[in-house]
Image: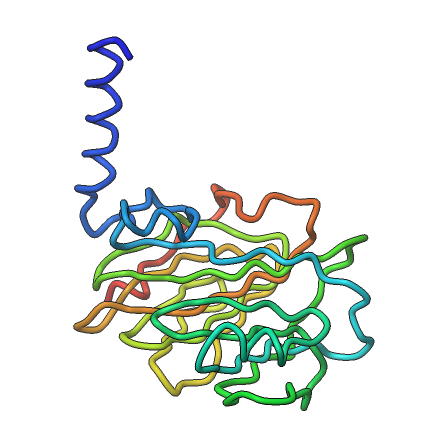
Amino acid sequence: MRRDAKCGALITIALILSAGSTHAQTGGTCVAASERATFEFGCFITARTILRELPSGPLFWHLDRYPDNAAAEAAKGPNGTVVQSFGTVWLFTIAVAGWKPSAGERVAEIGPLPLVRAEQHAAVYMEGVFKPGMASEVHRHPGVEAWHTVSGEMCVETPKGRFIQRPGDPAIIVPAGQPMELIGTGGSTRESLVLILQDASQPRSTTAHDWTPKGLCRK
C-alpha cells in the first residue's frame, strides 16, 4: 500500500473509532460479530438464517438459553438458529405462539411479528451495544425489527412516538418500512438482542432520508 493511501485508511479508521455521541462506532450501521475486536460499540450481526416453510398463523421470536452449543443444537427445531451473544448460548426460533423446544430455559417470546410478503424470508440476528448517547442512523428495514434488552436502556423513536426498553420490559416491535432512530439511554451500556425478519431479497437496512426525528429520545 502506498504511504498516502495507508495514511488515508488510518485516518478513516480513527474517525470511526473516535465518533462521539452522534453515531455508534461502527459508523451507524451493522458489521459482522467477528469485528467486535475492532469496534467496542455498535451493531453486530451474529447470524442470518433463510427460513423454510413458515407455519401459518401469527409468528413469534422464541428466545431460549442453554449451557453450551451442543445442548442448543440438540434442541433446535425448524427455523431455529444457535447464536452466542453476551456470554450466553441462545437458540432463536421463529415459530407460532406457545412453541417450545425439547429443552432449555425460556427467556422470552416476542410477537406477533407482522410478516412482509416475500418469496423467501430471512431472520437476521444482531447485538446492539450502545453507550449512553450513542445513536443509529435514521433508517428502515424491509421487514419487522424487534428487540430484547439484556442490560442498560435503549430508546427508539419512530413517527409513532418514542419507546423505551430496559431488561424485563415488553418487547419493542417496529413494522417493515417504518423509519426509526435508536439511542442508548440511561446511565450504563445498553446490550440488546435484535431480530430483523425480512424479505431475503432486499438489503437489510436503508437510510431514511424522508423523515427527521423530533429528538424525543434525547430529552
The image quadrant where one finds the C terminus is bottom left
Work out whether 63 lies above or below 105. Answer: above
| Left or right of residue 9: residue 94 | right
Q: Nearer the viewer, residue 140 or 61?
A: 61
Q: Nearer the viewer, residue 189 or 69?
A: 69
How did the renderer colour the structure? rainbow
Q: Which of the 4 quarters of the picture holds residue 79?
A: bottom right
As drawn, the residue found furthest toward the front would be 70
| Left or right of residue 146: residue 87 | left
Residue 83 position in % (x across, y down): 50, 66
Q: Which of the 4 quarters of the picture holds residue 96?
A: bottom right
Q: Residue at x 53, y 74 (%)?
A: 70
Q: Nearer the viewer, residue 216 or 163?
A: 163
The image quadrant where one finds the N terminus is top left
Residue 25 position in % (x across, y down): 27, 47
Work out whether 13 lies above or below 141. Answer: above
Q: Residue at x 63, y 52 (%)?
A: 142
Q: Which of the 4 quarters of the picture holds residue 190?
A: bottom left
Residue 167 position in % (x across, y down): 35, 83
| Number of numbered labels in the structure image | 0
Q: Residue at x 34, y 80 (%)?
A: 166
Work out whether 20 lies above or below 54. Answer: above
Residue 7 position in % (x across, y down): 19, 18
